[in-house]
Image (cartoon, rainbow, N blue to C red):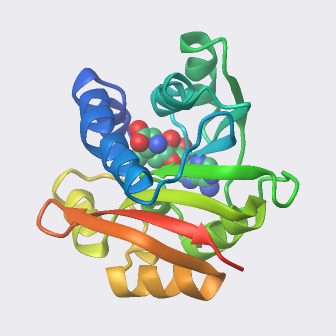
Amino acid sequence: MELNKLEFKLMNNPVRRWLQKNIEFKAFNEFLNKHNITLEGKAILDAGCGSGYSTNLIHQTYAPSELLGIDLMPSQISRAKINYPHINFEVGNVLQTNLPPGKFDAIFVFGILHHIPDWRQAVTELHRVLKPGGVCLIEDLNKDTSHFFATYLKLDHPPEAYFSWEQFTDSLEATGFTILNQKRIFTNGIGSFLCLKSS
Ligand SMILES: C[S@@+](CC[C@H](N)C(=O)[O-])C[C@H]1O[C@@H](n2cnc3c(N)ncnc32)[C@H](O)[C@@H]1O
């Protein structure tokens, strides 16, 4: 899987990094603070880490005991390894990570599920590798926003991964997550979720 040229540029530039730090990561931290959840010294996975910017934010913020960034794109993982040599990165697929069950206290997922036709299987796999009582922080696009970007910017967003928020939250809950907090921005088109592995 490769991002097309435009999406690659959209994901690898200073504006994207600013948004990720000051909007998306900030929203996750507000969720965690509100629920008195601390990730300091915990085991954390950054699923679909791209070139590793978010993984480094996680490293700087929580000093995790264990931190792994995975992404399907070998070129992004090569870039991540060069940018952040102090962090562990691997090429990996969130549909089948081959990681042990219950390995992580927390998983961050920044904007990847709208790329994955079988996004429900990705949710199931992330749930599997999370410890009971662990949290998954997900930021993603709903069907209208994903379709909008696919139509007007010609990004490769598979129609099978167009989901409404209702379908998305139903799937999280059916998998065994309890949604502790959620918010929407960009006229309801981008959602952030704090999910607890309750079963
Ligand atoms: C829109 S980019 C987001 C990258 C990064 N998380 C960010 O927010 O800047 C989507 C990323 O998901 C990755 N991806 C797509 N399908 C994946 C899969 N099945 N397993 C792991 N990563 C995947 C792509 O390689 C790409 O880096």
**Rendered position, 66 above or below 156:** above
| Whether residue 17 is situated above or below residue 111 in the rendered picture | above
Q: Residue furthest left?
A: 187
Q: Nearer the viewer, residue 33 or 4?
A: 33
Residue 179 visible in the picture: yes
Q: How many marks?
A: 0
Residue 3 appears in the picture as rendered: no
Residue lying at 67% horizontally and 33% vertically, measured from the top left: 41
As drawn, is 51 to the left or to the right of 143?
right
Considering the image in quadrants, where does the C terminus appear? bottom right
Quarter residue 124 falls in: bottom right
Work out which residue is located at the far front of the displayed protein and give it: 36
Q: Position of residue 139 (x, y in %)?
A: 39, 57
Q: In the displayed structure, does residue 53 sit left or right of residue 43? A: left
Task: Give the percent coordinates (x, y) of residue 103.
Answer: 81, 52
Residue 173 location, x and y as percent?
55, 84
At horizontal 52% and vertical 24% (from top left) the residue drawn is: 56
Percent position (x, y) of residue 193?
Answer: 41, 64
- Residue ID at (18%, 70%): 188
Q: Is residue 150 above or below residue 58?
A: below
Q: Tell which of 11 and 7 is nearer to you.
A: 11
